Image (spheres, helix red, strand yellow):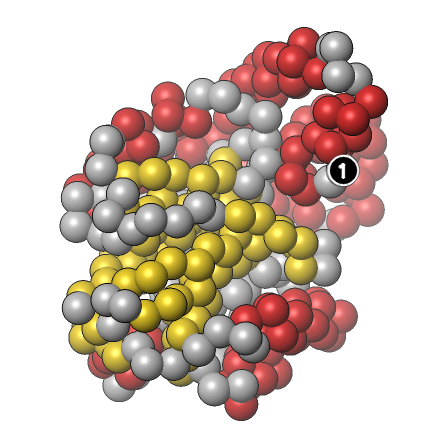
Amino acid sequence: MKLNIITWNINFIHDNWLERLDHINKILEKETDKTDIIALQEATLPFNNKIKELHTFLKKTNVNYFDTSLLERNGLYKYILENCPKYNKYIFSAFEYLMNKLLWLCGYIFSYWGEYIKKLYFKHPYIFLSIGLCCIPIFLGMWYFIGLLTIVSNKIDTVVQSKYIGNRVIQYFDFKYNNKDIRCINIHFPPGDKEKDKIRRLNHIKEIVSFCNSKDNVIILGDFNDTRKSKMYKYLKKSGYKNAVYKAVGEELKTFPSNKPEKCIDFVMIKGDIKVKNASVFGSINASDHKGIKVTLDV
């Protein structure tokens, strides 16, 4: 039985976001009609209650969607519920209002100057930090933009949940498909070429593998921010996971950067009684700096 899945980092807010958003929505508008699971990274804004106004494809009635938020990234939500029972709805409304305004402000700033801000962050972190301290609301807003969004066909009966892995949030859900129990995980690992960054990603994947050890059939997909040569990837292979794209086409399909792909840092990794029918990449610089991956699995 076919299971069609997609993973795609859509590079939320940055780099001409206002122009790219239309391309992203047009692509995903078509894909939601024929895809069972869509795992997006860099897709949401915390506390924003207008996600359907951004991602118009979510208005379709044949899908359910689940996003991560600032509330899930720390204990704030639980704290407010427990300590402010009379006023929590007003507090949440205030956060939503502020975040909606912050979305507009940061959308404008990062859409036109996002690439320069990103270069400043990686090449001159101390200058970036100094500017960030002067613009704390924008700095904090940018920090929390990196949210996950999982879209599931309403043919699949499940609820997507969020969980901490180190200092990152993953989305995961269990479902039954063709009488097989499957766990699917949407991830976005931290970037960076330093050894400490590589070790962090390795530790993250170790924790995820441990989290899934009790499951026979697992799909881990998303932006791994590392290559097939990494210790993280090799650990996955040793743990019994297979690269779905490599199994389908016999080679690596490069995903980053989308204008001239040089490497593959986005993967669909599978374990268990799951076969691969075909795989491909899609997208262009007009939509995101990553190419997305489409995979058809046989479950």
Instruction: Say what amino acid the circle numbered 1 marks.
Output: Gly
User: 185 left or right of 102?
Assistant: left
Q: How many C-alpha atoms fall within 10 Å of the one at disc 1: few (<14), some, or many (≥20)?
A: few
Looking at the figure, which quarter contains the N terminus? bottom left
> In the picture shown, does residue 113 fall above or below 3?
above
Residue occupying the point 52% across, 65% down: 224
Left or right of 82 on screen, residue 143: left
For image coordinates 35% across by 31% down, the residue present is: 55
SS type, badge 1 = loop
Query: What residue is disc 1 on?
Result: 75
**Quadrant containing the C terminus in the rendered view:** bottom left
150, 26: nearer the viewer? 150
Judge left or right: residue 117 versus residue 83. Answer: left
Residue located farthest toward the front when viewing the structure as drawn: 179
**Rendered position, 26 above or below 194:** above
The percent coordinates of residue 259 (x first, y second) are 34, 56
In the rendered image, which quarter is residue 27 located in?
A: top left
The answer to whether residue 100 is above or below residue 116 is above
| x, y percent for residue 270 | 39, 75
| Residue 133, percent from left and from top | 82, 31
**x 70%, y 30%: residue:** 77
Q: Residue 220: x, y in percent? A: 45, 67
Q: Is residue 236 above or below residue 79?
A: below
The answer to which of 253 and 128 lies nearer the viewer is 253
